[in-house]
Image (tube, grey):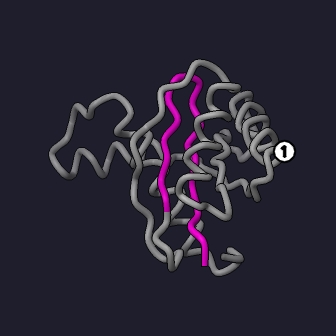
Amino acid sequence: MSRILAVDWGTRRVGLAISDESAMLARSLPTLSVRGIKDAVRQVDAVARESEAGTIVVGLPVHDSGAESESSAAARRLGGALAARGHRVVYLDERLSSEKAREILADRGDTRPQPGRVDAVAAALLLQEYLDAPSSSV
């Protein structure tokens, strides 16, 4: 079974998480600093290939109502460009993942996390949600 990579898209930072080989557990990877979508595609593609990820889960930042946002369109462009490079891409609602990540970090005593730490934890939460979902075809 191959690994699964999760992407928490941001215009300046991209949070990443990778599954174990059994696709049961998610762990954060270092957050990428990016300069636009082309740079993000290049860097995420490199991480996916290096980690031998068979699937990339791209988080869709949607509004509380469930409607997609401008950031969702950018995340879909990122996913589309990764698919064009030969990756299997799936999208997952990432609503409130950053807030949940901040809560987790605060519970651990990290009330002022380093830049990128929230993104990395949010990516791990996104990936774990995907791995735990009964409908995910892992």
Magenta-span inclusion, residue 20: no
The residue drawn where x is 64% and y is 81% is: 134
The reply, left or right, for residue 71 in relation to residue 80 is left
Question: Hey, what amino acid is under mark 1?
Answer: Ala
Q: Along the horizontal axis of the image, is 8 left or right of 27?
A: right
Report the residue that reaches farthest toward the top.
35
In the picture shown, does residue 18 fall above or below 32?
below
Q: Position of residue 33 (x, y in %)?
A: 48, 26
Q: Is 137 on the left-hand or right-hand side of 27?
A: right
Crowd band around label 1 with a 10 angstrom C-alpha radius: few (<14), some (14–19), many (20+): few
x, y percent for residue 77:
79, 35
Image: magenta residue range = 1-18
Q: Secondary structure at mark 1?
A: helix
**Residue drawn at (70%, 25%) of the image:** 38
Q: Residue at x 75, y 54 (%)?
A: 87
Which residue position holds label 1? Answer: 84
| Outermost residue toward the front in this view | 50
Q: Quadrant of residue 65?
A: top right
Q: Residue furthest left?
A: 109
- Could you tell me what secondary structure mostly forms the magenta stretch? strand
Residue 40 drawn at (x, y percent)? 62, 31
Toward the viewer: 22 or 135?
Answer: 22
